[in-house]
Amino acid sequence: MNTQGFKHIFTGLVCSTAILGCQTVTSTLNTQKTNDLVVATWNIEHLAAQNNQGCKGRENSDYAALSAYKNKVDADIYALQEVGSVAAVQRVFNPSEWQVFISDRADSPSYTCRGSEQSSTQQKVAYAVKKTITVNNLTHLDALSAPQFGLRKALQLNIEHAGKSLSLINFHLKSGCFVDDYLDSDRKSCGVLAQQAEILKSTLKQQQKSQPNLVLLGDFNHRLANPNNRLRADLGLTNTVKQSAWVNTTDAVQGCHPKYPAPIDHIIVSSSLVQHLDKPESQFHYFEDMTPNNMLSDHCALTLRFNF
């Protein structure tokens, strides 16, 4: 993306979007070291801009609870999935403290939500970034949405922190293919995921040439921690830097949802960043009420801490 396009996103999406019912948030005291950087991925489940919209209708108290949870997680950068708009994100992330960037994916037709019978809102990927973080560039990665209309794009964010250049790519891959080998299934969703896997491999190969410090994070809709998983093998993932250019930090982590112990949210780092990890594993942050029907979202935030 050229510089002019980036400035348009920065000023147009972040500064000019109206705030709908945004709660006033008091920042928690940040005791982390200056050079620490905490990144998070969080599928926030059908986040809408207005009350009682979409598949996960929420009231003011729900948005306030999401914001309080976000403060408790205390990340510097959130890669978000399933958000409807910038205004939706700003109901959880106060725009006086956070920069918001969202995918330029075209709106897809709404559908009737299963259970609530309401009309769906958009499901886009986005970032919420503390204003203390320097953002150098934003790139919309269209290729992953090519195999089928309505698929989600990836969103790449380049930042500067403590003298280090870092690139994050936010994913939300095709759902519905939870078998370990997507080539050994006749499900349509697995065929689509197989196409995305090829695109993903090609994209990462290109990215590594220009940016060695990469963080891949998001809702992969796939159990990459399973050693027999084909996508894991195709991407060359491992949990030890000696074996691969990519290290999966969720290999020893249990998923947060009570019904689904194997995680589908992942944070993967290039081997060049392993030396800067505070701990080798990422961490899920549980809600106060983990009863499935009472969870703030059907995904918990997953964080990883760096120290540069």
Image (cartoon, rainbow, N blue to C red):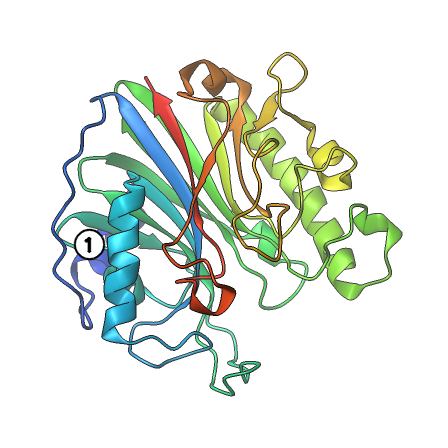
Residue underneath mark 1 = 11
Q: Which of 294 and 153 is in front in this view?
A: 294
Residue 77, compared with residue 160, is above or below; it is below
Can residue 270 be seen? yes
Q: Is mark 1 on a helix, strand or loop?
A: helix
Q: Can residue 87 be seen in this view?
A: no
Name the residue at 61% across, 32% down.
Answer: 251
Residue at the far bottom: name it: 117
In front of the other: 305 or 13: 305
Q: With respect to residue 204, does 183 lie above or below?
A: below
- Residue 210 percent location from the top left of the image: 49, 25
Residue 300 rendering spot, x and y as whole percentages? 45, 51
Q: Position of residue 175 (x, y in %)?
A: 64, 60
Asked if 223 appears above or below 288 in the picture, the reply is above
- Residue 19 figure quarter: bottom left
Q: Residue 291: x, y in percent? A: 48, 63
